[in-house]
Image (spheres, grey):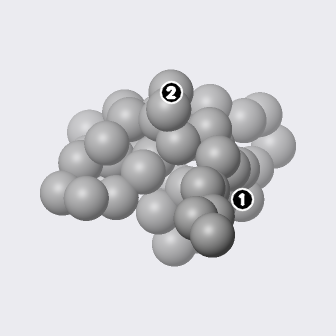
């Protein structure tokens, strides 16, 4: 039996978002909800979800 994961938490530690694996931003084997999270918030703040609070 094979189990497939469709949803997972954004790889950004402070982010609360749940992302669809097939539409997430993929970087270094991790899945992110936004480009800001994928870049580690070096030049961008916030994320795809208003009120999340990650930065």
Q: Quadrant of residue 1?
A: bottom right
Position in image of residue 35 (x %, y %)? 37, 33
Query: Which residue sits at x=72%, y=35%?
Result: 49
The residue to which callout 1 is attached is: 16
Query: Which residue sits at x=25%, y=59%?
Result: 29
Position in image of residue 4 (x %, y %)? 60, 56
Q: Is residue 47 visible?
A: no
In front: label 2 or label 1: 2
Q: Residue furthest front?
A: 1
- Mark 2 nearby-residue class (10 Å; few <14, some 14–19, many ≥20): few
Q: Is residue 26 left or right of residue 31?
A: left
Position in image of residue 18 (x %, y %)? 70, 50
Q: How many marks?
A: 2
- Mark 1 nearby-residue class (10 Å; few <14, some 14–19, many ≥20): some
Residue 31 is marked as none
Q: Is residue 4 visible?
A: yes
Residue 23 is marked as 2
State whether residue 42 is above or below residue 2.
above
Q: Residue furthest right?
A: 51
State whether residue 1 is above or below residue 52.
below
Q: Nearer the viewer, residue 36 or 5?
A: 5
Q: Is residue 40 left or right of residue 46?
A: left
Q: CA distance from mark 2 to mark 1?
A: 17 Å
Q: Quadrant of residue 51?
A: top right
Q: Is residue 49 left or right of residue 39?
A: right
Circles 2 and 1: CB atoms closer than 8 Å? no
């Amino acid at each position: 039996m094979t189990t497939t994961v469709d949803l997972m938490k954004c790889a950004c530690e402070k982010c609360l978002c749940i992302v669809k694996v097939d539409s997430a931003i993929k970087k270094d084997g991790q899945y992110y909800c936004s480009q800001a999270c994928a870049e580690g918030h070096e030049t961008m703040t916030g994320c795809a979800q208003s009120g999340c609070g990650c930065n």
